[in-house]
Amino acid sequence: MTPRGWTRANLRHVLAMLRYGANPAATVYDSIGPDFFLALAPGWLNLGLWEGDGGDPSEAPVAVRRLVERIAAALPGGGDVLDVGNGLAAQDLVIAATVRPRSLTAVNITWSQLEAGRDRLREAGARGVCADACDLPFADVSFDGVISVEAAFHFPSRERFFREAFRVLRPGGVLAMSDLPTVRLPQGPREALAAVAMLRGWGLRPAAAASPGTIVATAAGAGFVDIRSELVGDRVVAPALRFVRDRLDAGRDGGPRTLGLAARAMLSQADVLWERGLLDYLLLEARKPERKS
């Protein structure tokens, strides 16, 4: 018997918080399931790129699409595209519409998410592959573009991901991604508590805490050039937190009371990290050099 509204996967997530095992991202997202009650829009798991402050709930389904459109716009059109960490595949429909790729391949570490997104993958004309972002099962120089939306902080190693993205890209190919960097380390017990809560709650490794400069330098170290980055937390993190807070306050989340209380506790920790300037939201574009003639 499980508490009302909780799934067995939810309980496994809670019980595993002290030891997630070798695949923490899969544990977390298996727990969330395909109908995460705090998702900004059905089928979406990103924080969105907002024009407003998050106070207008009707902007949420627009904001999540806008974020993917913004990132995908950097990819070359008409080529072979790899989406690494594709969530529930709603973003693959947007990638397909934005880039019009010759082929679209979507990688996810979680079988359950690939299964939940099967119809969206089919509609996008995409092939789903269950694989690790740091050990991509593709031949060298297989893709013209690699996109990763709000997933890299879950990867075992950003360095290995960048090297894998570089390897599978053709010369001149483009990497476009978003990430959640750590602007500074916690100071004092309140900030430390918030940071640990985020790491444990989302199954993140300590290595997930990387500054924007470190992330850019890691991409450069993998061989990428023409790297462009932008911090847009005021258009992503701030309004998303406002949206979720308003939804919980208004009782619009549709979830059971116990899950709502857990969400409020996690939201309060995220508020500390954002309001005290510990985290931000990074957009990054980079290119693999052309072959020397």
Image: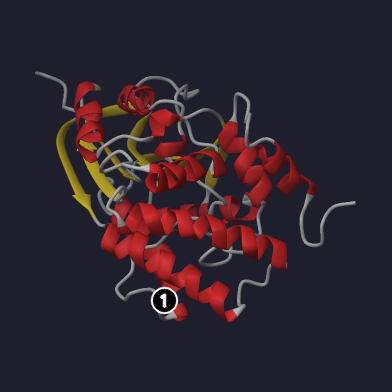
Query: Which residue sits at x=64%, y=51%?
Result: 32
Residue at image point 23% right, 43% down: 285
Per the image, the residue denoted by label 1 is 59
Give the amino acid type for the residue marked by disc 1 in the picture.
Glu
At 76% from the left edge and 56% from the top edge, which residue is drawn? 6
Residue for point 63% across, 63% down? 261
Colouring method of the image: secondary structure
Where's the C terminus, which quadrant? top left
Q: Quadrant of residue 143?
A: top left
Check disc 1: other Cα within 10 Å, few if <14, some if 14-19, many if 20+: some
Question: In terms of depth relative to the viewer, which is nearer, 85 or 257?
Answer: 257
Extreme residue in the front direction: 189
- Percent across and percent down for residue 30 are 67, 43
Q: Among all residues in the image, which is located at the extreme right?
A: 1
In the rendered image of this protein, does residue 140 appear above or below residue 74?
above
Nearer to the camera, 153 or 43: 153
Quarter of the figure with residue 27: top right
The percent coordinates of residue 148 (x first, y second) are 39, 42
The reply to whether residue 56 is in sight is: yes
Q: What x and y, as percent, mark residue 135? A: 47, 21
The spot of residue 278 in percent (x, y) is 30, 47
129 to the left or right of 9: left
State the residue lying farthest toward the left: 293
Number of marks in the rendered image: 1
Residue 71 is left or right of residue 132, and the answer is left
Q: Nearer the viewer, residue 133 or 257?
A: 257
Q: Quadrant of residue 36?
A: bottom right
Secondary structure under the numbered disc 1 in the rendered image: helix
- Residue 36 can be seen in this image: no
